[in-house]
Amino acid sequence: MTETLYPDFGVLLVDDEPDWLGSLTLTLETAGGINNITTCSDSRQVLSILEEKRIGLVMLDLTMPHLSGEEVLAQIAERYPDTAVIILSGLNQLETAVRCMRLGAFDYCVKTDEEERIVGSVLRAIRMVEMRSEFQEMSSRLISRELSHPEAFSAIVTGDRSMLDVFAYIEAVAKSPQPLLITGESGVGKELIAQAVHRLSGCRGKLVTVNVAGLDDTVFADTLFGHVRGAYTGADQARRGMVEEASDGTLFLDEIGDLSIPSQVKLLRLLQEREYYPLGCDLPKRLKARIIVATHQNLSAKEGEGKFRRDLYYRLRTHRVQIPALRERRGDIPLLLDHFLAEAAEALGKKKPTPPKGLAQFLSTYSFPGNVRELKAMVFDAVSVHRDRMLSMDSFVKAVESAQAEAGPSTAAPPRQNPFSGFDELPTFSDAAAFLVQEALARANGNQTLAARLLGISQPALSKRLKMMHS
C-alpha cells in the first residue's frame, strides 16, 4: 500500500461517471501517493464540499449535467481563489482549454492522456499550492517576527535577530514534504535546527540521524537502504536501512557535502522516485520520511567544480536555511556562557560558578572558528578545574591563545570601523592611548591581565603605560 505523501492536502474529484471517479482515485493513490481524496458525482455539491473540507485541488470534468465544468470553475475562482483546478475533458479542444485557463484553471487534461501525464499535472498543482501557502506563511512570520511554537527551539540559546528570523522561516516550511538544506560552519548547531524542524513537522515517526562523511558508495547504500539476507558475503541476516527506520518521521543526513558522486546519484533517485531498493532485493520500497540534509561546505562552489551534481543540489535546496556563525552574533555569547556554566556544573556535580565580569567581553574578542561547540568545550574545561566561588579567567585565556597559535592569524577578529572617523579634531596619541587604557580597565573590572588582552598588548607593556599616565 502506498503511503500518503500529502496527508493534509485534500483533492476533490468531480465527474458524473462513477467508474471514472473510481479509476482516477486508484491512479492517484497508487502512482501519486495521494490518499486524501474526496469524490463528487453532482457538480451542484462542489461549493458545499469546499466549504466543509480543506481542499487544495479540484479535478473537474468539463461536461456534466446541471452545472458544466466551466460554470463550476468560474464559481471556484470567485469564491476559493487559492484552490487549484485541473479541467478534465473527453476531447482535446484547444479553444475550450484556452478559455478554461483564462478562467483560472491550472491545467487542462484529456481523459485519454497517459496516466503519467495526469499524475504529473496533479503533483505540480499540489506543489504550486504548497509553495504559495509556504510563501504567504513565511512572509507573515517574517513581518510579524512572532513564533507560534517557540518551545520547539528551547534547546537553542539565542536572542539574536538573525537566528529568530531563521526560526520563523523554519516554522513556515516545517510541514512541507520537500527536502530542507541546512548550511553553516561546523559547531553552529545544525543538528539542533534539524531536531526543531522534526518537532514542528507533525511527523509521527522518529528523527533518524546519519553522518554520511567518509562512507563509501557501498556502505552508504547499505546504511540507507539496508539489505536482504544473502545480499553479499557475511550478510547472514536481513537489515533495515535508515530510510525505513525513519518511516513516518524524518531522515537527517549530516555532512552531505562529502558524498561521492555515485552516492549522490542514489540519493537523487531516492528523492525523485521516492523509492529505493535494499541491497539484493528486486522489489522497491517507498520513501516514507521527510529528508533534511546539512553541510558546512559550499555546495554551490562544489557544484561549479563538478564535485556535486547540479540536479541534486537544486533538488536539495527547495528549502534552505543558513545558520550564522557565533562571531556574527556575539550578543549570544553572554547567554551561551551562562547556559553552559549551568549545564557543566550540573554534569560535573558542582555548584554553578560565578564568572568574572570581564569574561563575556574577553570572549567576544575571539572569533570562535569552532563556534558554539568550541565555547561549550571551553566552559566545561574551565568548570572541571574550578575550585573557588569565582571562575578563573586563566583557562579561557590559555584556550584562546592556544587556538590562535595553532590556527594562525585567520582566527583574528574581523576589522572594525575607525572609531575616530567622525571626529573634527583628532586626539593626540597620548590622549588616545590613555582613553583606551581606561576603557579596557573598566571593562576588565580592574583586571590588568584581561585589560592587556583586550588592548592586544602584554601585561608589562600595560604596566609601563600606567606608570607613564600617572607620572
Image (cartoon, rainbow, N blue to C red):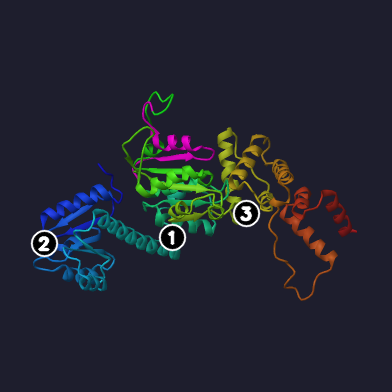
The Cα–Cα distance between marks 1 and 3, rounded to whole angstroms, is: 25 Å
Q: Residue 90, percent across and down?
A: 16, 63
* Mark 1 lies on residue: 146
Q: Residue at x 66, y 53 (%)?
A: 364
* Mark 3 lies on residue: 327
Q: Residue 189, percent across and down?
A: 53, 47
Was residue 226 drawn as part of the magenta stretch in this picture?
yes
* Mark 2 lies on residue: 42
Label 3's element?
Answer: helix
The answer to whether residue 170 shows anywhere in this view is: yes
Mark closer to the chain start, 1 or 3: 1
* CB under 8 Å between discs 3 and 2: no
The answer to whether residue 202 shows anywhere in this view is: no
* CB under 8 Å between discs 2 and 1: no
Image quadrant occupied by the N terminus? top left
Task: Indicate which label's residue lies in the foreground, 1 or 3.
Answer: 3
Q: Residue 181, percent across and down?
A: 47, 51
On the rendered structure, is 212 left or right of 87? right
Q: Residue at x 85, y 64 (%)?
A: 430
The Cα–Cα distance between marks 2 and 1, rounded to whole angstroms, is: 44 Å
Farthest residue to the right: give it.
471
**Quadrant assignment, res 91:** bottom left
On the rendered structure, is 213 left or right of 89? right
* Residue density around tag 1, few if under 14, some if 14–19, many if 20 or more, within 10 Å: some
